[in-house]
């Protein structure tokens, strides 16, 4: 038997189920004691059954094993509401789980492999979610509905399923060779449909903005801001810049495996291609020479210059050009998947710029023309992640979605991540953890072409658009890299900070 876990609102109830895969994976250890729902028999096909709640409406989820047929995989989920549910708690599942810009589907479901650090999205055609049930899926007391969605086929024995508002359902079996009786075309997919899947990365930005890091499996990239290291049109390190490189080098040496380290210079698009290529080469050489003094003989440094040919931020704004002026240091980390912080100095955590609370106490925030409460109901370890549940309630009168609750448009190093404005302002990407010298962002994954907006998805609720009435609440789920801390601080810059949140599991 294996144990499934769910992170959700006040009710987070878990059932054990026996997998029917050819390889029954060992459970990831937890410290919490799951409770049986007692409301229905557990299906004998390895399904995972959990109870959740949304806006006062109790919902029982039955997540069936992911069925792989050829290149595709079908996820089937049953949603049921008890007869004695409060009156007026009807839900449209397809409206709740739909992708932005579309009407009725379950396009925001994701599959996650925490061990292999991979994520899968529902198939899409011309940017619109397809391969999913397109009916309203209206759920009322005493009723049940079923959704289906196709993904690219995972090649792992089990996956976690990330639901908007309902949380993370863990250890869902993946089975092969089943006759599912449904094809992607039956759910609206054309031959041109794509099924996004990508490697999960963890990302951090130093408090002073001078450095950022991203890690995927064992591949790490540290980005040093050229504006911190060099004056305009100069490739010589000042004493202050040399000290900044030394600080970064010491942290890289602690995290890296010995071997090749590649240092790449990049510029903005001001001046000619030839001039920028030469400048980027000279800057890479200057940083590499300084790095070598700290890294030592076990590391072989190689340099290259890219000039303006590989921008990470589109456009010609001052912020975009600053993000494109950079030196990247690529290397292999010794411990795959762990969070990595690299800074250019000893920088203390910034003072909070919004309301502050501690532990499980709620904090009140003004956003979207209303007053909201935010409470960290749980942060727990799950594989390489810290899975956070943030309960968002409406304090002021009226009904509306808490869009913008977690921050404003991206600035600085965030411009390089390739995320849409919708993801950055309407979702929970701005909910970070405070590390020793950096903001640690929710894990993300590449799902499109590098350098384009909306190239990345986020392992968090990406579009918090459910209407919330006064006195009601919804739960937002976030997957952060595990910092190794016993307590964490959740910070949404300019909005709120919650300190001393205990980590369980």
Image (cartoon, rainbow, N blue to C red):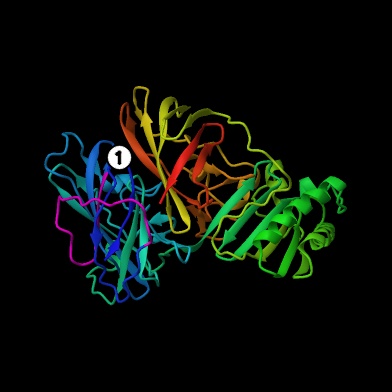
Residue 175 or 114: which is nearer the viewer?
114
Question: At x 33% / y 32%, what residue is drawn?
Answer: 468
**Start-end of magenta stretch:** 28-52
Where in the figure is residue 24, as x and y percent of width and height?
31, 72
Q: Is residue 30 magenta?
A: yes
Q: Quadrant of the N terminus?
A: bottom left
Where in the figure is residue 13, as x and y percent of width and height?
26, 49
Q: Determine whether, in the image, residue 69 is placed left or right of residue 203.
A: left
Q: Determine whether, in the image, residue 504 is placed left or right of residue 88.
A: right
| Label 1 element class | loop
175 is higher (above) or lower (below) than 146: below
**Mark 1 neighbour class, 10 Å CA radius: few under 14, some 14 to 19, many 20 or more:** some
Residue 208 figure quarter: top right
Question: At x 63% / y 38%, what residue is drawn?
Answer: 349
Residue where numbered disc 1 is placed: 10
Provide the major secondary structure of the magenta segment. Answer: loop
Question: At x 16% / y 39%, what residue is drawn?
Answer: 85
Where in the figure is residue 169, as x and y percent of width and height?
33, 55
Q: Is residue 156 magenta?
A: no
């Amino acid at each position: 038997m294996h144990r499934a876990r769910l992170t959700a609102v006040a009710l987070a109830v878990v059932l054990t189920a026996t997998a029917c895969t050819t390889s029954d994976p060992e459970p990831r250890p937890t410290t919490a004691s799951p409770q049986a729902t007692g409301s229905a028999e557990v299906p004998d096909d390895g399904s995972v059954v959990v109870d959740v709640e949304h806006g006062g409406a109790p919902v029982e989820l039955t997540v069936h094993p992911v069925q792989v047929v050829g290149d595709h995989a079908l996820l089937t989920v049953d949603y049921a509401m008890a007869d004695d549910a409060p009156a007026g708690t009807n839900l449209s599942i397809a409206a709740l789980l739909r992708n932005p810009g579309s009407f009725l589907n379950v396009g925001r479901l994701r599959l996650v492999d925490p061990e292999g650090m991979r994520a899968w999205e529902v198939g899409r055609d011309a940017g619109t979610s397809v391969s999913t049930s397109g009916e309203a899926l209206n759920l009322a007391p005493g009723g049940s509905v079923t959704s289906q969605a196709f993904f690219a086929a995972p090649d792992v024995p089990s996956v976690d399923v990330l639901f908007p508002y309902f949380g993370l359902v863990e250890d869902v079996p993946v089975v092969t060779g089943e006759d599912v009786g449904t094809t992607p075309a039956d759910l609206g997919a054309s031959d041109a449909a794509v099924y996004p899947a990508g490697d999960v990365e963890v990302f951090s930005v130093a408090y002073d903005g001078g450095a950022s890091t991203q890690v995927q499996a064992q591949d790490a990239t540290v980005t040093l801001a050229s504006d911190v290291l060099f004056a305009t049109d100069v490739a010589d390190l000042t004493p202050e810049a040399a000290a900044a490189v030394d600080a970064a080098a010491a942290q890289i040496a602690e995290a890296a495996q010995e071997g090749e380290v590649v240092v790449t210079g990049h510029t903005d698009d001001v001046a000619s291609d030839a001039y920028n290529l030469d400048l980027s080469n000279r800057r890479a050489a200057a940083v590499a020479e300084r790095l070598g003094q700290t890294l030592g003989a076990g590391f072989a440094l190689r340099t290259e210059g890219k000039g303006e040919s590989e921008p990470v931020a589109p456009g010609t704004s001052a912020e975009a050009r600053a993000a494109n002026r950079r030196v990247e240091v690529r290397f292999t980390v010794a411990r795959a998947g762990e969070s990595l912080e690299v800074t250019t100095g000893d920088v203390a955590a910034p003072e909070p710029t919004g309301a502050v609370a501690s532990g499980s106490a709620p904090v009140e925030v003004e956003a979207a023309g209303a007053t909201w409460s935010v409470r960290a109901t749980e942060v727990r370890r799950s594989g390489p992640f810290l899975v956070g549940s943030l309960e968002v309630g409406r304090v002021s009168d009226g009904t509306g979605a808490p869009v913008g609750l977690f921050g404003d448009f991206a600035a600085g190093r965030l411009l390089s991540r390739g995320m849409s404005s919708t993801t950055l302002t309407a979702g929970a990407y701005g909910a970070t953890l405070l590390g020793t010298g950096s903001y640690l962002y929710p894990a993300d994954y590449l799902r499109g072409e590098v350098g384009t907006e909306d190239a990345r998805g986020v392992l968090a609720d990406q579009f918090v658009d459910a209407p919330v009435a006064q006195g009601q609440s919804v739960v937002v789920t976030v997957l952060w890299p595990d910092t190794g801390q016993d307590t964490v601080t959740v910070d949404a810059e300019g909005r709120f900070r919650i300190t001393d949140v205990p980590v369980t599991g």
